[in-house]
Image (cartoon, grey):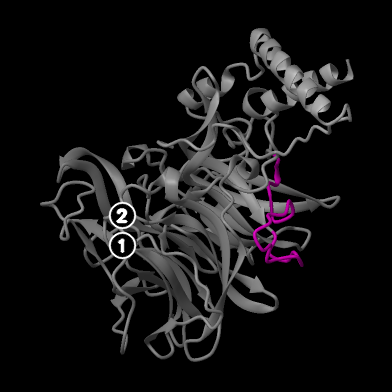
Amino acid sequence: MVYRLLAVLAAFVLLGHTEGKKRPHRRAPACRKAANLHNIQASGGKKTLVQFGGRGFVWARKGKRRHLKKQTVFLGDTWTFDYSNPHLPDHGKLKKSDWSQPELVPNSAGDPLSPSPRWKMESTMINDDKTLVMFGGCSTQTAEGVNSELWVFEESMVHGNLKGHWRQVRTLNHPRPRRGHTVVSNETHLVVVGGKTWSDLVVANTQDQCIVDLWSIPLDALAPGREDGVWTQGASFPDSCRWGTTGSRLKHPTRGDVLAIFGGRALNPNASWHSTAPDAYWYYDDLWLYFFKENVWEKAEPKGVKPQKRDHHGADALNGDLFVFGGRMCEGREASCAASDIWSYSLDTNTWTEHSSSSGMMPTPRYMAAVAAAPWKGHPAIFVIGGESLLGDNISSTKKSSLNDVWVFVPGQRGGGAWEQLTESHCKWKSTGVGQPYPQGYAAPAELLAELSAPTFPSATVLLSAAVAVSLLGLVTARCRGGKDVQLLDTDDGPMYESMPNA
C-alpha cells in the first residue's frame, strides 16, 4: 500500500513536469534582441541596470499534449540587473539575485503599469541617471506598428523593495512615429533623430520609409502633470538617410554638448527587402556630430583606422569617449556578418582605438545587443547583454540564437582592457519561465493567449493510467531491492518535450 501511495504521488510529480507543473519563478529575462539598457539610480540610492522590451521568445504550451515550444513575441517586461552582487560572476550557475523584476506601481488609478510590448524603441537617461526617457518603438516585424509614445521610468526603494514607475507623457506637435532612431539629451532638452517610419506609399517594394528629421523638447515638459510640452523641429540629418545608428552625448572641449551618431544602414532602392545580395543594403562607418547649442551638423574626419561599416551595434559614452560594440555588417546569417569588436572614439584626439582583451575572453559576435556604461568593481565599464548571434542559415533566428548572457568590459590604457562574462545565456524554461512575461494590464498576442489558456492539469484517464503504470513500476523496483523504501526524486530536469526539431 505504501508503494502504491508513493507511486500515485510520483504520477502527480511526473505529470506536473509536462502538463500540470506550476509556472516556475522567472530568474532571468527571456532571451531577446533590441532591448533598451541603462544604468539607473533608484530614489533610495541603489544603482542597477534596467532593461526593457525587445523581441525574443518565450516558452508556450502547444498542441493537444501541451508540449512546450518556443513562441516569438515582442516583449514589454521590465528587469533590473544588480551588478553590485558580490558573487558575480556566476560561473554558469544563475542566482536568483542576479536579475529581478521591480514591482510596477501605477501613478494613478487606471494608468497602465508599463508601455505596451515593442522593440527598436530608443531611450536615454536624464536627472543625474534617475529618470529613463523612452520614445517610439514598434510592435511588428515591418515598420507598420511604429508609435510616437513618450514614456519616463523611475525606480524607488520602499522598505527594502524595489518599485518601478512608468508614466506616459502627453505632448504637442510630436514627431512622426518611428523605430531604429536616435534618442539623446543634454542638460536642457531631449532630442530625437531619424529612424524608420511607415508610409502609405510603396517605395522599393516596401512601405517602410527612412527619415532624417530632428526634434527636441525641453526636459521640464516631462514633469508629472505636464501635457503642454511642445516639440520643435531642428536641423535635419544632412547626409544619406539611414537607420540602426547609435547616438551618444559627448562633451566638446570648446563647443559644449555634442551628439555623436555612428553607423547605420539603408536599403538600396533597386534591391528587395531583406535581400542577401552584397549590394542590397548600404552600410555606413562615418561619424556625425550634432552641436546642441549651434543646431548644426558636422561630419567627423577621424585620423587613422576606424571601425568596419555596421548597423544595430551598441554604444554609450564612457570616460568622455564614445564606445561602440558589435553590430551587423551584412544581411546574411553567416557568422562573418556579425561582430564582437569594441572601439572607442576620442573627441580630444579625433581618433578611433580598437580595444583588445587581456583576459582572452570576449562575447560571441552579435547584433542588437543591449549596451550601457556602468561601474564594475570600482572601474568605469561597458556592459553588454543579450542580442542575437549569427551562426548560419539553419541555426540563426530569434528562436534559435537569441541570448541573455551578461558581459562587462573594463577598458585599459592604449587600447587595452579585459572582458569578463558575468552570466551565461540561460534561455531554458527553468530560468525564463513559461508563458507570456508581460506586465498586468497588457495581454500577450491572441494566439499565445489561446495556447496558454487551456487547462494544464492532466485528465483523469491520463492520471489513472500513469498512476497504474508507476504503481507497477514501484512494486517491481521495491521487490527488486528486497522490499526497501524507494526515494522518489523530483529532479527538475525540464519538460519531456522541451527540445523540438523545428523550435
Q: Position of residue 333 (x, y in %)?
A: 31, 54
Q: Badge 2 local density, few (<14 within 10 Å), some, or many (20+)?
A: some
Q: Which disc, if any, is residue 464?
A: none
Q: Find residue 226 and report its horizontal and vertical position in percent.
A: 58, 46
Task: Tell me if residue 137 can be seen.
Answer: no
Q: Mark 2: which amino acid?
A: Arg
Q: How many marks?
A: 2
The magenta region covers 82-105
**Cβ–Cβ below 8 Å for labels 1 and 2?**
yes
Q: Is residue 256 above or below residue 335?
A: below
Viewer-proximal residue among 386 and 19: 19
Residue located at (41% from left, 64% from top) = 365
Secondary structure under the numbered disc 2 in the rendered image: loop
The numbered dot on residue 337 is 1
At 58% across and 19% down in the image, what residue appears? 453
> Which of the 4 image quarters holds residue 406?
bottom right
Point 64% across, 41% down: residue? 430
Identified by mark 1, the residue type is Cys
Q: Which residue is labeled 2 in the image? A: 333
Q: Nearer the viewer, residue 134 or 497?
A: 497
- Residue 102 in the image: x percent, y percent? 70, 47
Query: Where residue 318 appears, x then y in whole percent?
Result: 54, 76
In the depicted structure, whether residue 220 falls above or below residue 398: below
Q: Is residue 84 magenta?
A: yes
Label 1: state its secondary structure: helix
Residue 276 visible, this angle: yes
Residue 501, by quadrant, is top left
